Image: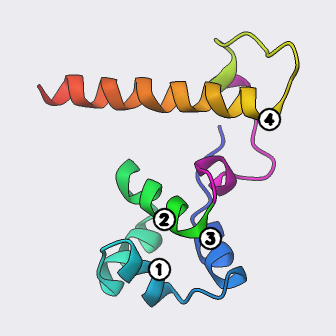
Amino acid sequence: MSKLDYNKIKNLAAAKRIPIKELARRCDLSEQGFHYMLKKQTMRVDTLERICETLEITMVDLFDDNMDTSHVLGAIPPASSGSYSDLMNKLDTIIELLRAEKYARID
């Protein structure tokens, strides 16, 4: 099973010349808290969304390059055109479903 590659957050920030301290500030996090989350390799979805927005990337960009997405997208029929925007629309749908499930558990 593939998982989020937390090192990619640091690498992508460095590639965009954004120090970790600045990335943490832009995401409304303390530098210490941000480093702790990276070390423990655990972050909330809304935190990951802020990081992606700040770095101008998608969450897909944070996963292993050798990621097998069949277990994630297996329930969704493949797009006839196979275009990137079709895939992104499907991923947006999955994210919305996961959020709805998360909030349903809270109620």
Q: Quarter holding the N terminus?
A: top right
Q: Circles 2 and 1: CB distance less than 8 Å?
A: yes
Q: Which residue is mark 1?
A: 23
Q: Residue 13: x, y in percent? A: 61, 78
Residue drawn at (67%, 22%), measured in percent from left and top? 73
User: Which type of secondary structure does the marked residue at label 3 adopt?
Assistant: helix
Gap in angstroms between the C-alphas marked 2 and 3: 13 Å
Sequence-first disc among 4 and 2: 2
Q: Quarter holding the C terminus?
A: top left
Residue drawn at (63%, 25%), measured in percent from left and top? 90
**Which numbered disc, 2 or 3, marks the residue closer to the eye?**
2
Q: Is residue 29 above or below residue 57?
A: below
Q: Is residue 57 left or right of residue 29?
A: right
User: Which type of secondary structure does the marked residue at label 2 adopt?
Assistant: helix
Q: Which residue is mark 3?
A: 7
Gap in angstroms between the C-alphas marked 2 and 1: 7 Å
Q: Which residue is mark 2?
A: 51
Mark 1 closeness class: few <14, some 14–19, many ≥20 residues within 10 Å? many
Mark 2 closeness class: few <14, some 14–19, many ≥20 residues within 10 Å? many
Magenta stretch bounds: 57-71
Which three-letter amino acid code belongs to the residue tagged 3? Answer: Asn
Which three-letter amino acid code belongs to the residue tagged 1? Answer: Leu
